[in-house]
Image (cartoon, coloured by chain):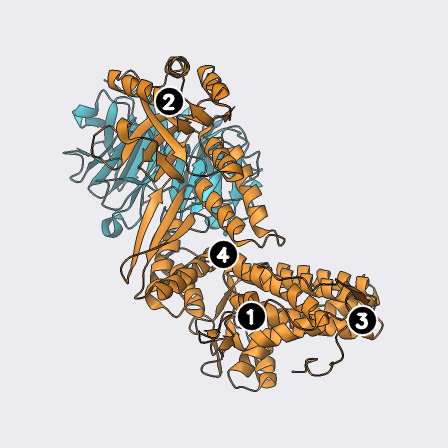
Amino acid sequence: MTPRNIFALAAGAQYCYAATNAGLWKWTADGGAWKQLAPQFAPVALTAVVTADDTVLIGANGDIAVSRDGTRTFGLAALPVKAQVLALAISPNFAADHIALAATTQDGVLRSTDGGATFHAWNFGLIDMHVNALLVSPDFAHDATIFAATDHAVFQSTNSGRAWRELPLPAEAVPCTALAFGHKGALLVGTEGAGLWSAPAPYTTFAREARMPADEINALATTPRGACAATSNGIYIFTGRTWKRIHTAEDALALAVSADGTAFAGTAEGAVFLISE
Amino acid sequence: MSSTRSKRKSVPPVRPGVVFDHDSSAGIDLLAHAVQGTLGPTPRMVAVERMSRDHTPEIMDDAGTLARRTLQLPDPRDDAGAMLLRQALWRQREACGDGAATLAVLANAMAREAHRARVAGAHPTLLRQGIEAAAAAVIAELHARATVIPGGAHGRTLLRAVAMSLCQDADLRDALVETIEVIGAEAGVQVLAHEGAGILREFVEGAMFEGGWITPGFVTTPGKTLDRAEDVAIVALNGTINDPQKIIQGLARIHTAGHRTVALVIDGLGDEGRQMLNQIHHREMIRVLPLRITKAGADLMLAFEDLCVLTGASLLYGEDPALADASFAAIEPWQIGSARRVWADDKRFGIIAGNRDPQRMRAAITRLRKELTSTSNTKTEELKALRTRLGRLNGGLGILRVGALTHQASETRRDEANRLARALQATLACGVVAGGGAELTRIGASLKAPENLSFDARQGFNLVARALAAPLRTIAENAGHDPSPVHVAVRDAADSIVFDARRGELRNMIEASVVDSVDVLVSIMQLAASVTAMSVTTDALVLRKQPPTSANP
C-alpha cells in the first residue's frame, strides 16, 4: 500500500521516517528510496513519529508504540487512557534522561521517563487539553523547558513537562498548530488562519511575523539559520532577513530537520520533498 | 531609630467622645516595635502572655501571629493605629506566608514620616497621592528587576534559596521544594496530618472534590477501594433524586445522547432511587456512578460551579425533591458534561481532562486570582477555599502528609508547611530579587518623584523612597551591626549583592541564600502604602461608650 497522507516526519543523520496513513516508512540517503517498515502497522494511520538513535516512537489513535532496535521490533507503551496522539517529542538528551512526551487531542500531555515504555498524564496548569504540537528546548538539560501549542493558547513548562503556564499570546493568535525556534532563539507559533507569531525570550511579548505572507501554518521546524514553515501557500524558509517561498506545495503537513541541517517536507498527497536553501 | 513610643503619655480620652487631630502613627509604632525584633536571619523571640497563668508565655518569632495575638491596646488612640497595622500584618501572613515583619517595619517608617510631613503642613490627601504613586513605582521596579525562576537545576537552586531563608526545617524544606517544583505555581497544595514523625508526598491528578461515592454498590469490582471510569458523562444536580420512573427517563436521555457511563454528582439518593440504580447497574445497559460533594450552602454551589466549568455540564436545580427528579428526567444533551476519566473512593472523587471550554476556564481562573490578591480579603478560611478552587481548576494537587513527635509540634510543622508552600508558589509565579531589604534599598535610592506631582505629593513620594531602606537597617541592627554603613554599602553595590547579616558581609544573593519573592514584596508594598495612606488621612477618632471587643481579623 502506498501512503496517501504524510502526517509526521522524523529526520536523523542520512535518514527520515514518515508516519503515514499506511504505517511507517523510512528513507535513507544511500538507497534513496522509501521502504515500508513494521508491516504490522501497515493498515494503521500513524499520526506521529520521533526518533533518537535506535529508538523510534510512533503514535496513532489510542496507542503509542516504541522500538529500541531501529524498528525491527515494536512494543506498545502503557498509557493511562486510550489517547489520540497528535505529536511526539523527545528530550535532546534522550539517551540519558529517557524523557518522551506525547501531545493528545483530549488528554493533554502524556510524559514518559522510561524511554516510552509507560506514559503518565502531567497536566498541572494545562487548561486546554487539545494539544497540537510540542517543542523541546535545545538546552533542555539545563532549562528543562518545553512548549505546548493548543487550540486556545501556548503553554510553557520549565519543569520538563509536569506543570504548565500559559504564555501571553494575543487572543486572535489561535488555534495554535505548530511551534519552532526561529532566528536568535525566538519562539515561533504557527496558527490556523492567523499567520505566524514570534516572541523573543522570555516569551512575554508576541508579535505577528509580518514578513510571513501565509495565514495558515501547518507545520514549523527549526533549521540552522532560523526556521522553515509548511503553509497553505507553499513552503517557506527564513533566510536571515525574510521568509522566502522555496516550494509551491500547498498541502505540506509535516516538516523535519536532521542534525546536519537536511530538511524534509511531507504532504497530504503522500509526497516528501527534500528541502534545500 | 527614633520612636514616638515614649513621647506621648496623657490621660486616656473620655468615652464616648471624639479625638481630634488623631495620630494613628503612634499605635502603628507600638505594634511595629513589638514585632520588628523578629526581622532577619537572627531574630529575637517575643513572649506573649497566655490567657491563663497555668501556662508559660507563648514564645514566637512570627510577626503575623504576634500581631494576631495583640488583641487590644489600653489607650484607644494607640489601639486604632495598632489595629490598622495588625489587620495588614495578618493579611500579609495569610496571603503570602511571609513578610509580616518587613511590612511592620516598612509601614512604621512610612507612617512616621507621613505624620511628620502632615504636622509640618502638608495636605494629607496630596501626601496620600504621592504615597500611592511611589508604591506603584516601586512595584513596577520590583517586577522589572525580578529574576524569573528558570527551569532545571538553576531554578531549583533559587527555590531552595528562598526556602532556606524562610524555613529552618531541612526535611520540610526539601519536601516542599520538590513538591512545588513538580506541581508549579498554581496547582493546589494540601498539607495533612501524618501519624509518623516523617513527611510523605503524593500527587493527585485532575480536579479533586471532597465527598466520594454515595454507595460502594456501584463499584466495578467488589472490594475495591477506588473506582475508575473512562469517557464519563457528568451530570451535576443540586438536589436528591428518588423517583424510579424519573431516574429511568433521565438515564434514557443520557443513553440516547450517546453516553454509556455517567457520574451523577448529586446531593443525595433516596432508597427507591438507590434500588433502581442497583437494578440498572446489574443490567449493564448504562454504568452509573452516584457521587456527592460534602459541602453545604454557598460552598456547595461554588464546588458545583467548578465542576461545571471543568466538565462543560450545566447545573440542574432541585432543592425540592420533586423538582430534582423532574429536572433529571428532563435533562437535555447540552446540560450533560463529560470527562475523559473519573475516579472515586468513599471520601473524594476526581475529574481528569473534563470537556471544558478553555475560555471559560481562563475567565474563572482569572477571577479567582483576582479575589485571592484582593487586599480586602483577610479571612483565613476564605483564602484557603480560594486557593483550593484555583488548584482544582488548574488540574492537580500535591498532598504533603506532615508528622512530628508531638501533636503540637506536628501542628506547628503543618502551619509552617502551608506558609512555605504559599511563599514558594508565589516565588515561582513572580520571580525573586535580592533579599534582606537590599533590592528595596536600591530601588529607594533610584526613585525620582515625577515632576507633575504637586509639592505635597512629592513629599509623599519621597518619604516612601526614604523608608524603603528601613527593613535593611532593621535587619542589620537586629544582627548587632551598625545600620548606616551597611545601608550605604548595599545601596552602592551591584544588583545581586545582599548583606548577609549572619556573617556581617556583602555577598551574592544566591550564595548567601538571601532572596525575596517579588510577590511577597509587592504585597508588602501595597499593604504598607494602604496602612500609611489610611493613617495619614485619618483626622478624627470616634470612641464608643464601651470599648469594642477584639476578634480575629
Q: Nearer the viewer, mark 1 or mark 2?
A: 1
* Chain of residue at mark 3: B
**Mark carried by residue B426:** 4
Is residue A242 something that shows in the picture? Answer: no
Is residue B249 something that shows in the picture? Answer: yes
Q: Distance between the residues labelled 4 and 1?
A: 18 Å
Q: Tell me the kind of residue under disc 3.
A: Arg
Secondary structure category for the residue under label 1? helix
Residue at numbered disc 1: B101
- Asked whether the beta carbons under mark 2 and mark 4 sit within 8 Å of each other, the answer is no
Residue at numbered disc 3: B118
Q: Tell me the kind of residue under disc 4.
A: Ala
Closer to the camera, B201 or B85? B85
Quarter of the image for the C terminus of chain B: give it: bottom right
**Which of the 4 image quarters holds residue B129?**
bottom right
Question: What residue is rendered at 71% in x and 63% in y?
Answer: B546
Q: Earlier in the sequence, mark 4 or mark 1?
A: 1
Q: Distance between the residues labelled 3 and 1?
A: 26 Å
Vertical order, B190 against B110 (above or below): above
Q: Are marks 1 and 2 on the same chain?
A: no
* Chain of residue at mark 4: B
Q: Nearer the viewer, mark 2 or mark 4?
A: 4
- Crowdedness near tag 1: few (<14), some (14–19) or many (≥20) residues, C-alpha within 10 Å: many
- Asked whether the beta carbons under mark 3 and mark 1 sit within 8 Å of each other, the answer is no
